[in-house]
Image (tube, rainbow, N blue to C red):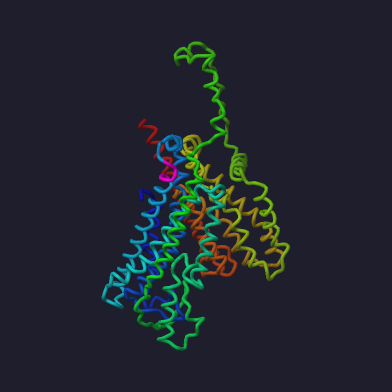
Amino acid sequence: MRSYSFLLVIGISVFAGYACVPDAAAGYEIFSIGGVRGIYNSAWLGGLAAMLTTMLLWLFGFFMLRSQISGDARLKLGPLIASAPVRKIRYIAGKAAANFVVLLVIGAVLLVAFMAMQLLRGEAAQLRLMDYMAPFFYVTFPSLFLLASLTVLFDVFPGLKGVLGNVLFFCLWIAVGVVSIAAPSDWWDLFGVSSILNAMARSAAEHYPALSSLEASGSFGYYPTEGQISTFEWQGAAWDHSLILIRLVWIAAGIGFIVLSALLFRRFEHPEASSKVHPLASGREKTSALPLAAVEHSGSLKLSPAVKVKGARFPGQVKAELKLMLKGMSLWWTLPAIVLIAAPLLVTANSVDSLLPFIMIWPLAIWSQMGTRDQHYFTTGLILSSSSPLAKWWTEWLSGVFITLLFSAGAIIRFVADGEMPALLAWGTGILFIPTLALALGTLGGSKKLFEVIYMLWWYMGPLNHVPSLDFLGVSDRKPALYLTLTVFLFAAVITVRLWQTGNLSIRRRSI
């Protein structure tokens, strides 16, 4: 909880509590059942709070908590934990339990936010705690326990620690959301929302018989409204005790994931490293360590002279930054990248728009490095003390723009060939916006996860699902002026943070 990411998720939860309970004259709805909604009483808002808690925390909570074990290794705590007498199952279970408690705290904050919104909107003055706590117990509690077990499983399962695991979980979140909303039975309802949705839909159909069965199925999204929206009074779902058995099955599945994580966990052991003998250790029998003063007077220790290069070789720095960005990208990543770059030139005109969003998701692992690599490898002080922070920022930003431009080559050629100048302008703005967003979030958050989760959610809602004002690529809704303004704002934010970091470093050096 002592992290900025925790405060960020708390802020998102409070904002969600406000945005998802709009005023009757707000002009939009977040949850709609055939164009109607329930009165903002404790039963309706308690059900909404339970559904939103599971759906939001399965995304934001996972990315916030998923690297607790990897964080121990990055902070060089691995040898201490590996040599400690604590058993693997206890260590893994402790991590999962701590993550579960953090998720419950965030869920409780969201629950309190919905209670406050009920009093603020004033459609139902009576605050009934049991209408809030029942869905929290039947829906939120078991779902978050299963999520907590997945946070440790994805952190120890081979191949799922990095950006691949993040993308796979994002796809899992979308799939689970679709299945949970349209679940044929409660057994498939990992989010635990089908029982609430079905009860709400049945009540809406009773009050408004004109609603068809298709329209009576609830869904989340952004729904613009005109005039006064029709409402009805919902008394809450009938919580059958048979649901307890289903929830116990999901809790058992979470325990199974924890046990599997303990079996996969290797206690930060590196057999290949232990088999290698350190060169200093291998030479202890032949030579003895000399005092520093003896080395200085012996004349046997010579350092290579430092040569000052006049003028910064900016193209060489950009080239070196590109090498760092592309380092570690395998052939299995490069081949699909080539296909995506050339794909806009090979498909028909009707298929271009549906293809364009997928081009701008493949370089996610490259963009997420921006602004975070120095902090991840503990080289921030070294970099800021040996080069201009603005020069470092420019090289990193230009490298990100170059990567984005490279992936956009096929789309740009297609826009020019088809004479789509407005689409080219919107896409060009996106080329500048994406690396700027990556560098800004990486610099401000210090972690890859912040950019990955925000970008994937933004990409999913905007270019892929055509939500107005969120389409930064201009696939369906072109707003280049908006995203050019955001780019300039992010520019200024990153430069300010860079200069502030450099100033703090200089103060610390002088104090030492």
Figure check: 123 above or below 471:
below
Viewer-nearest residue: 176 or 454:
176
Q: Quadrant of residue 252?
A: bottom left
475 relative position to 410: left or right: left
Q: Is residue 87 left or right of residue 299?
A: left
Locate residue 258, reporting x and y percent: 46, 51
Residue 477: % across, % down: 56, 69
Q: Can residue 270 be seen in this view?
A: yes
Residue closest to the eye, 306 or 204? 204
Q: Which residue is drawn at 40% across and 79% down?
A: 37
Q: Does residue 495 show up?
A: no
View extreme (right): residue: 346
Between residues 304 and 3, which one lies in front from this camera angle? 3
Residue 511 drawn above or below residue 96: above
- Residue 312 vertical placement versus 300 (above, below): below
- Hey, which quadrant is residue 32 in on the image? bottom left
Q: Nearer the viewer, residue 404 or 78?
A: 78
> Horizontally, is 96 left or right of 392 in the view?
left
User: Which residue is rendered at x = 35% and y = 32% of the image?
Assistant: 511
Q: In which quarter of the image is the C terminus?
A: top left
Query: What type of secondary structure mainly makes up the magenta span?
Result: helix
Residue 379 position, x and y percent, is 49, 37
Residue 459 in the image, given as x and y percentages of width and height? 54, 62
- Residue in the picture at 28% in, 72% down: 128
The residue most toward the left is 126
Q: What stretch is highlighted in magenta?
A: 87-91
Q: How many marks?
A: 0
Residue 475 on the magenta span: no
At x 64%, y 67%, the residue is 353
